[in-house]
Amino acid sequence: MSAHHLTFFFDLNRAHATAIRRFDSALGSVHGIGLNDLHLLQVLDQAPGRRLRRTDLAQQLGLTASGVTWMLRPLTKRRLITSQASEDDGRVTFAVLTEPGRQLVADAVPTARRIAAELLDPQVSKDELTRAAAVIARLAQG
């Protein structure tokens, strides 16, 4: 790996940390969740039946199954998500978005969009954003 490749990842890591702090602060103060929570809730909101196996949820979020289990605990305690056993396989459980979870997603997404626009609009053109998103999407594929 060349120096500019590594610098790219250091810069990406710093940008990620900065963005997460900004999202978490705003989302937390208004909605009581962070960006990672919103991402998980939105993935469930868009899933068929608003439910996914934990392994599928982990794959979509780029996490381990144990990482998803850790993320689900506080959301379950807040009754934003519930657990549902599979009717076909007793070993499988689904994470299911509840109605309060759906409402929270509906309320929090506009806030998150505003934050994203504030972070990006003054600095990044649509073409730059499209190119950067393509690079990040390739990285996310592993």
Image: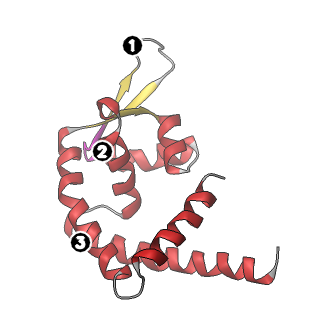
Label pair 2/1, CB-CB below 8 angstroms: no
Q: Residue at x 23, y 60 (%)?
A: 108
Residue 43 placement (x, y as % from top left)? 37, 46
* Residue matched to label 1: 87
In the image, is residue 86 above or below residue 7?
A: above
Q: Residue at x 66, y 75 (%)?
A: 9
Q: Say whether disc 1 or disc 3 marks the residue closer to the N-terminus.
A: 3
Q: For the residues carrying marks 2 and 3, which lies nearer the camera in this image?
A: 3
Name the image quarter holding residue 3.
bottom right
The amino acid beneath tag 1 is Glu
* Residue matched to label 2: 77
Label pair 1/3, CB-CB below 8 angstroms: no
Q: Residue at x 39, y 13 (%)?
A: 87
The amino acid beneath tag 3 is Ser
Q: Does the magenta run of residues contain 78?
A: yes
**Numbered badge on residue 29:** 3
C-alpha distance separating marks 2 and 1: 24 Å
Q: Say whether disc 2 or disc 1 marks the residue closer to the N-terminus.
A: 2
Residue 62 placement (x, y as % from top left)? 55, 51
What are the residue bounds of the magenta stretch?
77-81
Q: For the residues carrying marks 1 and 3, which lies nearer the camera in this image?
A: 1
